[in-house]
Image (cartoon, coloured by chain):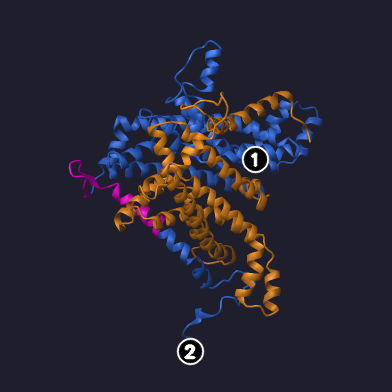
Amino acid sequence: MSATVPEAAPAASGDETPERRFPTAPLFLSAPAVLLFAALVLIPLFLTALLSFNQFDYATGRTGGFTLEHYLSVLTDEYYLEIFLRTFRISALATVICVVIGVPEAYILSRMSNPWRSIFLLVILAPLLVSVVVRAFGWSMLLGPEGPVNAALMAFGIGRMRLLYTEGTVIVALVHVMLPFMVIPVWTSLQKLDPAVEQAALSFGASRGTAIVRVVAPQILPGILSGSLIVFGLSASAFAIPGLLGGRRLKMVATVVYDQYLSDLNWPMGAAVAALLLIANLIVMLTYHRLVEGHYRRRLG
Amino acid sequence: MTRNGPVALIFHTLVVIFMLAPLAIVCLVAFTPENTLSLPTNGFSLRWFDAVFHHPDFVQSFWNSLWLAVLSATLAVVLAVPASLAITRWEFPGRGFLNALFLSPLIIPHLVLGVAMLRLFAIVGATGSFAWLVAAHIVIVTPYVMRLLIAAISGFDRSVEQAAFSLGASEATVFRRVTLPMILPGVTGGWLIAFINSFDELTMSIFITSPSTVTLPVRMYMYATESIDPMMAAVSALIIGITAVAVLLLDRVYGLDRILVGQH
């Protein structure tokens, strides 16, 4: 009987070090989570990938068969090309603005002393936890025709401007939502930085600007890059901001997927757009992963 | 510590105003006595809060969201504790894959998860089911719990457990009396961040809720695309209040900077 079930040995026996032979304990421990993730992540993604190759019959709404027409029309139809281009343009601009605002802000925060540093870090990061619908609604009031921004424009004699449902408004709101994602990685790389190095540069006669450009900037560059990739990826798939502030005219990729699914009921088309969005996002995120990992390895090596 | 110059401080003030302005205006407008979205210039009124509490759709959605967040955060912790133990304490084939699988909802856009789950729900006939909605929310909040738990378990001195074993404690006792108390900050912090993320989630939920299971963010999104009155501001102010309470709790039990910025 000793030879029949070798893997039934109690898992706790060799607990001191990670076990070398195939252990059963982690299998049991992770099984419930694995089952849930297989059922609700892997299978649905696979089904949606299949769906994106199905034909769609507008008359009956039925789906079936195999076709590449949805991918072809996304890549050739001007309507979709324009939306992908607009999404790319808006996300890129939001990313650049996040760098321009977020990097100096993280640097200023890191030079504050407590308690101000903790308080303002909380002020900058906590909006991240407030529902994006609330923040979009806040911007629609700030920039609305009766809002304080237009009131200020009137007071300065510029006159009322139509700010809602423009690309500018979508970008401003995206920057507001994404700024914490830029501040966090830059802040993290600033924390690793030894302030003595900057002091040394200053004491050797470097100007403040030179010290920042030649000493601080190179060390936080990986943080800026990873922040940019996160901000770009999240902006490109943002839904609530263009949905509430872009109106019917200003579509982005996510709002088009929503329309295809819930208004046009053309699920295969929506699935194809979603699949392309996922692939683009995975490329961005894996680049991020490589970058951060590579940086980490270099620092250790 | 070097100090910031005046230019830096002005820049900083503008950034802080930029971050807080949309939240501040929502909270102010919520107290307006007028019928339109306007700042309360003629005194404060609670009429729009009253309107929210008497609006059956908003009340129902609030309870949906609350139960959904409590259930999915709790079940995510129940699933994530053993899974994190498995990932951090054993070397086994497929460990890297499991780790990537559990963190994947952070990388996959919620929009894509939403359409994928809609497809699954349509096939198995789960459209409109609250239980399946809970399951979907468990998936998106589990990565947040796992990140904190993996950090808590990795930075854990195992000699304490071994001491308990050598004194004759059973595995269950060691887990209950030694392991769990030591990772408790990770568990409570993970539960709170999971609660907040589930309570706020819009993009996935909008695809998989039905009229009876509509969550508060989805209800607000629908409401805001049709009509805009100060009731939206009152609901938003209530959400900001609930989030603020959760954030303060989170800061107490775990440290907000540790959760958002990572361990250092």
| Mark 1 residue element | helix
Residue neighbourhood size for the residue with mark 2, other residues' Cα within 10 Å, grouped as few (<14), some (14–19), many (≥20): few
In the picture shown, does residue A282 fall above or below B75?
Answer: above
Label 2 resides on the chain identified as A
For this orientation, the residue located farthest to the bottom is A1
Question: Disc 1 to disc 2, how far (Cα)?
Answer: 62 Å
From the viewer's perspective, tell me whether residue B97 is left or right of residue A204: left
User: Are marks 1 and 2 in one subunit?
Assistant: yes
From the viewer's perspective, tell me whether residue B41 is left or right of residue A259: right
Asked where in the image residue A101 lies, by quadrant, the reply is top right
From the viewer's perspective, tell me whether residue A164 is left or right of residue B30: left
Q: Which residue is mark 1?
A: A122
Amino acid of disc 1: Leu
Amino acid of disc 2: Met
Q: Position of residue B223 (x, y in %)?
A: 40, 37
Q: Position of residue B7 (x, y in %)?
A: 70, 23
For this orientation, the residue located farthest to the left is A59
Query: In the depicted view, which residue is nearer to us: A20 or A73?
Result: A73
Residue B232 lies within the magenta run: no
Query: In the depicted view, which residue is nearer to us: B134 or A202?
Result: B134
In the picture shown, does residue A289 fall above or below A40?
Answer: above
In the rendered image, the quadrant that contains the N terminus of chain B is top right
Q: Position of residue B133 (x, y in %)?
A: 41, 54
Which is more N-terminal, label 2 or label 1? Answer: 2
Residue B229 seen from this side: yes
Label 1 resides on the chain identified as A
Q: Colour of chain B?
A: orange
Residue occupying image coordinates x 78% and y 38%: A196
Q: Colour of chain A?
A: blue
Q: Which residues are magenta?
A: A39-65
Q: Which residue is mark 2?
A: A1
Camera-near label (1 vs 2) is 1
